[in-house]
Each structure stands twice: as structure tokens, then as C-alpha cells.
Amino acid sequence: TAATAATAATANDMTSAYASPASSFADSIERAAAGARFSSVGRQLLGPRLPVAIDWNDPPPELWYAAYVAGKTLLNVVEAHGGVPRGVLGVLGVNVYVFCKPGGVLFGDVCLNPYAVLHMNQLERVVTSAFVHRDLFHLLNNMTGLVEDGSYVESRDGVGSFLAQTALLLVLSQGALVTLSGAERKLTGRGGSRGASGWIDDALGGLTTTTTTTTRRSGGGGAETLPFYSSGVVGFSGVNYALKVVASHRRPLGSRVLLLGVLPVPARYSFWCELALNTLLMPSSGTFAAHFAGCVAGLVSVYVPLLAGVGKIGTGRFGRGGRGAIPGTGQRLGGRYLRGDAPRDSRETRGAATAQGLGHS
């Protein structure tokens, strides 16, 4: 019948829309190119060595602004917490050590590429990519975010809990980035290969940063979240955004933080504001994807344990009534209270109401 034919046509359209393009000739070429690019030989030959040196005879003006924001943030943290906590100093030290490594590192050795992680089992990229930065401006921005939000989280949870949360958020944010790229390839049927020149262009112009004034748009027929075959991302900002989500949900309701060091915004929504502003300043698909993946990782780390009733991830304080619960406003999700939002003891509440009723009788 006509209805059956229409249903079959719709099913075929849906199948083609969601089918993997792995069998196509073009995709086979892209996979072969990616396999060569991220092989032990190929990654030594392609891509720049990081960090990229800055011309101090003509430094970019945004570098001075980044230094100003970093200095202001450091003073605020010292004033609020008496200094930078040990855990934050340790994570910052690892980033600075890698940045100052003699001779630098090859971009192809450390960058996060979804194909290399999923199909070549180069899982170390999930970690190594986070601790490498393009230049001093990139490092300053990411470490400023780490000091601001990391210090707040560690001052409340302690050094052990902070380090555990940071490690978890690193894996979650990088994993979310790879998942987003794989899902985009599955749904759109394109891997985004633009050849070696496009890959190097990603390295030089599209690295993950917290803020920048550089703009670069993806070529072709629209921006991709993170090209599955040809992309390469480095930087700590995915973890920073995840920490920002965690910190924003720990700050008192109604409190405000300074966006870019100058613009006050509600703390609870500061990560969305910063994501929107950075996307406007730097509409690079890879940068947006890394930042958005960090937001997703942070939200997962906050709300999944709450909805599961186990406190918050990384504190080691679980169970009913534990101090790990995050206080809230009494709002409910999915018909149940979040931990910390529910009344202390519903039976106690009912008993008080009963006693009050007896007193009036």
C-alpha cells in the first residue's frame, strides 16, 4: 500500500541519515590519510613544535590583557584563601613544566584527535593533550581559570578531593569531546578531512583557549564540532570549563563572578556566559567543541551523583545525609529533591505538623 511504501521510504531515509560513512570511498581515503598522519612516522613529520615562540619585539596586545587578568585573579585568590592551594599549584606546575620543556613537544605526538584515540588506541592523547599549550597567551588564560575556580573548589574540599575531581573532569571533558566528534561524523556522514594543510592550520589557529581575539572559521559548507579525522586540539580549557561548572554550583546563590576579569555575571550561569562570549570572540569549531565538552563534563559530575543520591564526585563523603550534598533552593528535578534540597527528615516534619494540630484541638 501507499502507507507501507511511505513508511519504508521514511525508514530508508533515517537509515541513510544515521548510517556510518565507513564504506564510502571518500571516507576510506580519509581514514587512510589519518592513519598515516598519526602513525609513529607521520606524526614526527607533520605539524609544528609547541609552544610557538612569541615575537617580543611586537607582542600581541591581548597578551598584556591576559597578564593583567592573571595578576588580578592571583591577588583575589590570595586575598580570599591566603594563597594558592597546594593542589592547584601542583596542577599548574605540571602545565608550566611541559610548557618550559627544552625543545618543546611535537603537536602530532600529543594533540587530541578522535580517530587516533578511537581507532588507533592512542589513549594517552586524552591526557597529554590537556597539558600542552600553543603559546604564552594560551597558557596564561588557561592557568588563570585554573587558579580562580580550582582554588575555590580546593578550599572547600581539600587537596585530595580536588586532585581526584580534576583527574575525573579531565577524562570526562576529553571523552565528551571525542564522543561529540564521533557522533557528528555518524550523523552527518563527514569526517572533516582537509588534508595536512588543514590539520596544521588547526594546530596554528584553532587551538583550545579560554579567551582570544583571533577569529577563524571552518572552511567548506559549515562549521563542524570537531573534524573526526583531521582535527587536533591541545590545552587545559576543557578541564577549566568543567571546574567552572563545579565551582559555580558550589558558590552561594545570588553571588557574582567577573567574566574576563571585568564583567560581573551570576556565578551559577557564569560558564554559559563565558562559553557564549568566547564563541563570539573566537568562532573556531574546535575551540567551541572543547569548551562545550568541558561544560558537559562539569554538569555530569555535578548532577549525576546528586540524582543518584551519592553526594558529589571526588569528595569521598557519600551516603544519606553526608556532607557531600550540595545545598540548594528546594527545587526538584524529575519529581524528586536533589540531595541537600530535601527537608531534613520528612517524618520529623510530619510529626511537628501533627503536634501542632493536636495543640489546636
Image (cartoon, rainbow, N blue to C red):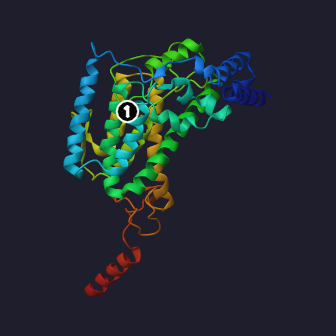
Locate residue 182, reporting x and y percent.
61, 31
Q: Identify the element where label 1 is drawn.
A: helix
Q: Which kind of residue does numbered mark 1 sit on?
A: Leu
Locate residue 288, reporting x and y percent.
44, 28
Locate residue 320, reporting x and y percent.
45, 69
Q: Is residue 158 above or below residue 355?
A: above
Point out the image quarter for the C terminus. Answer: bottom left
Q: Which residue is mark 1?
A: 275
Q: What residue appears at the point 24 percent right and 32 percent down from the top-left corner? A: 69
Q: Is residue 265 above or below residue 209?
A: below
Using residue 111 as the reference point, say whether residue 243 is left or right of it.
Answer: left
Question: Residue placed farthest to the right in the image?
Answer: 1
Q: Specify whether residue 162 is in view.
A: yes
Q: Residues within 10 Å of mark 1 (few under 14, many from 20)?
A: some
Q: Specify whether residue 249 is in view.
A: no
Quadrant for residue 15, please give it: top right
Seen from the viewer's position, the closer of residues 60 and 48 is 48
Q: Is residue 102 above or below residue 74?
A: above
Quadrant for residue 265, please give it: top left
Point out the image quarter for the N terminus. Answer: top right
Locate residue 46, reporting x and y percent.
57, 17
Using residue 63 as the reference point, say whether residue 173 is left or right of it.
Answer: right
Q: Is residue 127 above or below residue 60?
A: below
Seen from the viewer's position, the closer of residues 113 and 288 is 113
